[in-house]
Image: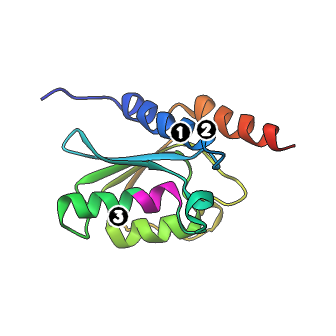
């Protein structure tokens, strides 16, 4: 089985963020990988679904759980272009996701600004993967809004 890098999978999440951008959604993309295979991919759908909980992470948690027929994702990795918010970090806790890899930090709404861990104690985190590319798509989106 071929072993793909974090950068490879983050590029797939960035593709999802671009899909969101094209739909005038805040461009955050996410994928979930299990045994080196993408089992879920999505992006923010809050505008389309008129649902403030329809973040990219929430979409892929649901899809991956359905795919695996299991509410726990402890053998999976979440790749997301932007640091998860408090809501998504809380959901990640309940999924027991094995690993989270994110690109750009979110100083305003990211879970790390809360000084207590919201993630499951066994969840490993890698941050800053393709950070510049992940940050640029968000910056470009909000520049179109000004």
Which secondary structure is most common in the magenta stretch? Answer: helix
**Residues under numbered marks 2 and 1 in contact, where contact means CB atoms less than 8 Å apart:** yes
- Magenta highlight on residue 56: yes
Q: In this view of the protein, can residue 140 be seen by the observer?
A: yes
Residue 63 located left or right of residue 21? left
Q: Residue at x 42, y 29 (%)?
A: 7
Q: In the rendered image, which residue does mark 1 sit on?
A: 19
Label 3, on which residue? 62
User: In the rendering, at what x and y percent does residue 123 appear?
Assistant: 36, 59
Res. 79 in view = no
Q: Where is residue 134 in the image (x, y as percent from the top left)?
A: 59, 36
Q: Say left or right for 68 vs 46.
A: left
Magenta residues? 55-59
Q: Determine the CA span between mark 2 and mark 1.
A: 5 Å
Circle 2 residue: 22
Labels 2, 3: front one:
2
Classify 137 as above or below 75: above
Furthest toward the right, the residue is 146
Count neighbours of disc 2 (C-alpha within 10 A) and say few if under 14, some if 14 to 19, many if 20 or more: few
Q: Is residue 120 left or right of residue 130?
A: left
109 or 145: nearer the eye? 145
Mark 1 vs 3, N-terminal side: 1
């Amino acid at each position: 089985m071929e072993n793909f890098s974090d950068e490879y999978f983050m590029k797939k999440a960035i593709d999802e963020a671009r899909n969101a951008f094209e739909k005038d959604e805040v461009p955050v993309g996410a994928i979930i990988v299990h045994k080196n295979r993408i089992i879920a991919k999505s992006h923010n759908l809050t505008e389309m679904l008129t649902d403030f909980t329809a973040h990219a992470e929430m979409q892929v948690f649901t899809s991956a759980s359905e795919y695996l027929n299991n509410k726990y994702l402890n053998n999976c990795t979440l790749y997301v272009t932007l640091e998860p918010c408090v809501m998504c970090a809380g959901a990640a806790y309940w999924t027991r996701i094995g690993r989270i890899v994110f690109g750009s930090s979110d100083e305003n709404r990211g879970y790390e600004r809360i000084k207590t861990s919201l993630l499951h104690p066994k969840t490993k985190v890698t941050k800053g993967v393709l950070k510049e590319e992940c940050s640029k798509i968000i910056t470009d989106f909000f520049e179109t809004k000004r």
